[in-house]
Image (cartoon, helix red, strand yellow):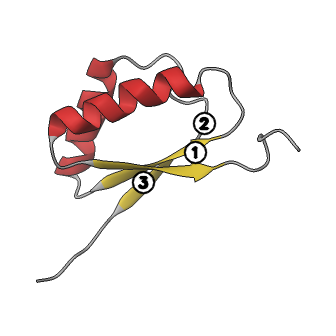
Amino acid sequence: MSFRVTEFGIPQGDFQSYTSADWAADIALAKAAGIDAFALNVGGDSTDVAEMKIAFAAAEADGTFKLFFSFDMVTAPLM
């Protein structure tokens, strides 16, 4: 069995106004282009949590598409 993942990075801030329909459409386009996953670049934006819930719900509804985090250390608050 072979395993191959093709991912596409999405910068934080590019999805702040996305609806579940927007995510579903982008997931469908990505799958048609052979993309298996989106790397969601997240940092310290106050909308990240709400937007991630919408994105992950859309990926779950698709059934096979994957999402994962790519943490933006430039925008993350310093400790």
Q: Give x and y (percent) for residue 78.
A: 88, 43
In the structure shown, which secondary structural element does the residue marked by tag 3 occupy?
strand
Asked if the residue under mark 1 is in contact with the one under mark 2, i.e. CB atoms within 8 Å, the reply is: yes
Report the Cα–Cα distance between label 2 and label 1.
5 Å
Q: Quadrant of the C terminus?
A: top right
Q: Give x and y (percent) for residue 18.
A: 42, 20
Residue closest to the eye, 13 or 3: 3
- According to the image, label 1 marks what residue? 41
Neighbour class for label 3 at 10 Å: few (<14), some, many (≥20)? few
Report the Cα–Cα distance between label 2 and label 3.
13 Å
Relative side of 38 to 61, left or right: right
Q: Amino acid at mark 1?
A: Asn
In the structure shown, which secondary structural element does the residue marked by tag 2 occupy?
loop
Q: Give x and y (percent) for residue 28.
A: 20, 39
Q: Give x and y (percent) for residue 53.
A: 41, 26
**Vertical position of residue 51 compared to residue 12: above or below:** above
Q: Quadrant of the N terminus?
A: bottom left
Residue closest to the eye, 78 or 45: 78
- According to the image, label 2 marks what residue? 12
The residue drawn where x is 68% and y is 39% is 43
Q: Amino acid at mark 2?
A: Gln
